[in-house]
Image (cartoon, rainbow, N blue to C red):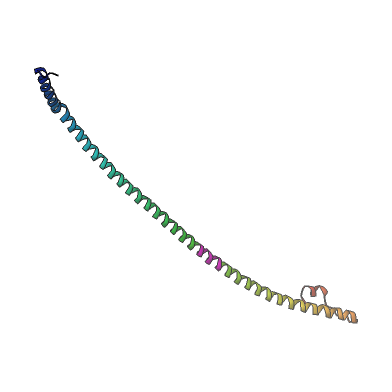
Amino acid sequence: MEFNATFLVSIISFLVFVEIMNRIFYVPLTSVVAKRKEMLDANYNDAKKFDDDAQVILKDRDDKLAKADTDSRKIISERVESENSKGKLLTDEAAKKSAEDIQSKKASLAEEKISVSSELDSRVVGLAENIASKVMGMEVKIDDEALLNGVK
């Protein structure tokens, strides 16, 4: 291999070419790549932050929904319990009133039974006297129809 001026000019021209390419192409390109990497990193960090915020908001929403569900179930169960106790009170009151009505009707029927029984006893006595007088031959003028209707 020979080292002559052409080789030296080739080396110098290659070094000048590399320096020109470095200033014109490589430095701006690396600068653009670095800026783009910074922008991508910033966008990635922003996206990660927004994703974290969204996860916090979703968790908060889920917690609020769960609390609202629990609260609504509690309110519903309290209302159902309250209405059941009101219904039980109304049923107890109605049962008590019915029992009182039954007792008063029983008392009324017992009094009516006594009055009807005494009336029947008096009619039976009158009919027995009438039958006895007819059997013994005594004619007592008692109207049978009047006895049956309760008139003596």
> Residue 3's image quarter?
top left
Residue at 12% from the left image edge and 26% from the top image edge: 19
Q: Is residue 118 left or right of residue 36?
A: right
Horizontal and vertical percent position of residue 31: 17, 33
| Residue projecting furthest to the front | 1
Residue at 86% from the left image edge and 78% from the top image edge: 131
Magenta segment includes 121: no
Magenta span dominant secondary structure? helix
Magenta segment includes 90: yes
Res. 152 visible in picture: no
Task: Judge by depth and name the residue closer to the eye, 41 or 94.
Answer: 41
> Residue 20's image quarter?
top left
Horizontal and vertical percent position of residue 146: 79, 74
Res. 96 visible in picture: yes
Residue at 84% from the left image edge and 79% from the top image edge: 130
Magenta segment: 84-93
Q: Is residue 101 left or right of residue 43?
A: right
Q: Is residue 121 left or right of residue 131?
A: left
